[in-house]
């Protein structure tokens, strides 16, 4: 027999399911001093790269080593990310993470396109996968960027109307347009937008990168591209470079 019981709705709260965009850190080693060095090298000069983004730590690449999660959480918070959960660890790692106040999120799925890198370069820094933010108006730079200068267009494209000199760095979550020689570093799709492109009137870069896939000047450009108008896009696992006016 089915019995219907009278219910009562709480006056002060409701509990519902929710989806939350997360930054994902693929932890490849339990060596936290090395992690600290590599995080500083990657993000130390871009303090605004994260904006208190919630983060899930994928422990699978780190192996079965012991991890000091309290120290790890403090380290990550220094870069304005908020660790909230872990996935992919051993039973011991997951128990230690729970004791440190982190949730277990085995169902958290990463976006494959955001963790790609060409394998021709030396050891990689920790991979960070980020959902691309919604587009907004472009950042306009109308003065030359000198060696040591850096511009970051968070959540938007950047348009540079003057030269990007060697030693300068242009970073954008969206596209990068350089209507002058590009001789420094250009990092487009910095927070995971694999559709981002780099366009310039004179391609002579030290480094170009889209959504984590990069190429450095150690691999010389062909004569058909070097010093000429060109665009760069991501196709599968490779950067595709082609003349702007083929």
Image (cartoon, grey):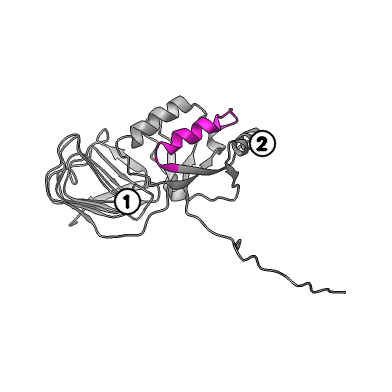
Name which residue lies at 43% across and 36% down.
Answer: 126
Q: What span is colored magenta in the figure?
A: 63-81
Residue 2 visible in the snapshot = yes
In the rendered image, which quarter contains the C terminus? bottom left
Is residue 80 shown in magenta?
A: yes
* SS class, disc 1: loop
Residue at 55% of width from left, 33% of height from top?
69
Q: Is residue 187 magenta?
A: no
Q: Is residue 184 above or below residue 172?
A: above
> Which mark sits nearer the N-terminus, 2 or 1?
2
The span from disc 2 to disc 1 (Cα, nearest Å) is 36 Å
Pinpoint residue 53: horizontal percent, then vertical percent: 43, 48
96 left or right of 127 in image: right
Judge from the rendering whether residue 107 lies leftward or rightward of residue 224; answer left or right. Answer: right
Which element carries disc 2, helix, strand or loop? Answer: helix
Please name the residue that numbered disc 1 is placed on. 173
- Which residue occupies the foreground of this view, 208 or 20? 20
Q: Residue at x 31, y 39 (%)?
A: 46
Residue 201 spot, x, y in % from top left: 15, 50
Residue appearing at x 27%, y 35% in the figure: 219
Q: Which residue is identified by label 2?
A: 91
Pick whichever, 244 or 50, lies toward us: 50
| Quadrant showing the N terminus | bottom right
């Amino acid at each position: 027999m089915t019995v219907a019981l009278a219910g009562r709705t709480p006056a002060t709260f409701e509990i519902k399911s929710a989806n939350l965009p997360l930054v994902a850190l693929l932890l490849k080693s339990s060596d936290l001093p090395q992690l600290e060095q590599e995080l500083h090298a990657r993000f130390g000069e871009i303090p605004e790269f994260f904006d208190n983004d919630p983060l899930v730590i994928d422990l699978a690449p780190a192996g079965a080593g012991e991890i000091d999660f309290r120290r790890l959480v403090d380290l990550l918070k220094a870069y304005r990310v908020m660790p909230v959960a872990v996935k992919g660890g051993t039973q011991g790692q997951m128990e230690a993470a729970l004791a440190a106040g982190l949730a277990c999120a085995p169902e958290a799925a990463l976006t494959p396109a955001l963790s790609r890198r060409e394998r021709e370069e030396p050891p990689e820094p920790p991979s960070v996968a980020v959902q691309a933010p919604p587009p907004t108006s472009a950042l306009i730079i109308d003065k030359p960027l000198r060696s040591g200068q850096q511009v970051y267009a968070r959540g938007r494209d950047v348009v540079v109307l003057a030269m990007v000199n060697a030693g300068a760095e242009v970073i954008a979550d969206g596209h990068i347009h350089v209507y002058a020689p590009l001789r420094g570093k250009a990092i487009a799709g910095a927070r995971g937008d694999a559709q981002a492109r780099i366009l310039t009137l004179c391609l002579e870069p030290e480094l170009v990168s889209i959504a984590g896939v990069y190429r450095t000047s150690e691999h010389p450009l062909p004569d058909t591209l070097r010093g000429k108008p060109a665009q760069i896009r991501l196709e599968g696992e490779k950067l595709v470079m082609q003349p702007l006016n083929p």
